[in-house]
Structures are given as structure tokens and as C-alpha cells.
Image (cartoon, rainbow, N blue to C red):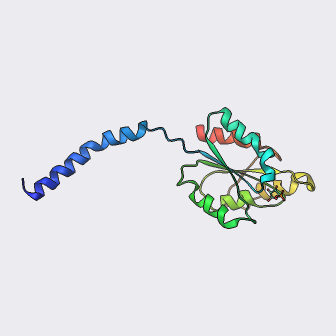
Amino acid sequence: MTPAEELERERETSVAEMPEVEEAFEEIEVDAPLVGIIMGSANDKPKMQPAGQALQDHGIRYEVRVLSAHRTPEATRDYCLNAKMRGLKVIIAGAGMSAALPGFAAAHTELPVIGVPIAGKNLGGLDALLSAAQMPPGVPVACVAVDGAKNAGLLAVRIINA
Ligand code: RP5
């Protein structure tokens, strides 16, 4: 067999094997998270916990990160830029005061972002509500109720199962 014929035979063999390889990959259980829950402060955890609970109740894998638009802007930007490539389908972003995390996240990803306004000491969460709900046109943020993390989780479930 000439070298050219050998090459051609190798090529045919590898092409013929591809469907089997693909099938084998499909069978591999990949437990990568589908939802990223991010929040501006570790102090937000108790109020964001119902989002994780709702996802868990529906068998949706998620991860949790403390990331802030103003305290850790570079880490937050990198997380959002890489989120889709890492296999995430939805980002849930919780923040108190007018911290801008949901809009900041939406500016750095094509994924759907669900904002959770968290009530702080002043203004009853109106500051956070407006910073998420009143995003200027072009950068969408879905916004649930103040302290509405449970609905954020349930909405993420619906988006993933749509
Ligand atoms: C926001 O500022 C956080 O989301 C938090 O709700 C608020 C206050 O943060 P801490 O001072 O409690 O860390 O960025």
C-alpha cells in the first residue's frame, strides 16, 4: 500500500468510527451546573437560598458564587463572559442596594439573567428593584419580586425546560 493509500484508509477509518465516538460521549454523565447563582455579598446567602432550593427540587444542577459588580468587577466580568462556554444556561443575580449586579452580568453574557432585588436596611429594596427592573433597552434583565429568590429559581427551571 502506498503512503497516499494508507493515509486515505486511515481517514476513512476515523470517519467511520465517529458516530460510535459520539454515541460513547452521549452516554457519559456530565454533571456540570446549568444555573449560576451569583450574589453581591455573602450576607445575601440566606435570601438567595430559596433559588437554590427551587432548582434542587426540580433536579437542576447549580453553582453559587459571591461576585460583586463594584467590589470584584473583574472576577464578575470573567465569570459572566465564560458562563455560556462552561455550559451554564441561566444566571440568577441577587443584589441589595443599587448594586447593579444583574445589569452588569447581562452586559457580559448572552445568557438569560434573572435579577433578584434584595431588600436592604433602607428603602425596602426599592433601590435594588429599580436597578434590576429599570434596565435601559438593549440589555435585558428579568426581574422577580423583592426578596423573590424562589421565583427566580422556578423561572430558571421553566427556561431550562422550555
Ligand atoms: C450589595 O450590597 C450586596 O448585594 C448586599 O446586598 C449589599 C450590602 O453588602 P454587605 O455590606 O452586606 O456586604 O452589593
Q: Position of residue 157 (x, y in %)?
A: 64, 38
Q: Is residue 54 left or right of residue 87?
A: right
151, 67: nearer the viewer: 67
In the picture as drawn, the residue positioned furthest to the right comes out as 122
- Residue 159 in picture, x, y percent from top left: 62, 42
Residue at 59% over, 37% down: 161
Q: Outermost residue toward the left?
A: 1
Q: Residue at x 79, y 61 (%)?
A: 99
Outermost residue, front side? 42
Residue 71 horizontal side relative to residue 63, left or right: right
- Residue 121 in the image: x percent, y percent? 92, 54
Using the rendered view, name the quadrant where residue 40 is placed. Answer: bottom right
Report the label total: 0
Question: Does residue 112 lie above or below 30 as drawn?
Answer: below
Q: Quadrant of the C terminus?
A: top right
| Residue 136 seen in the current view | yes
Name the residue: 67% across, 59% down.
105
Closer to us: 106 or 76: 76
Q: Quadrant of residue 21?
A: top left
Q: Is residue 162 visible?
A: no
Residue displayed at 67% across by 61% down: 76
Q: Position of residue 80 (x, y in %)?
A: 62, 58
Left or right: 77 with respect to 129? left
* Ligand 1 occupies quarter: bottom right
Q: Is residue 110 left or right of residue 5?
A: right
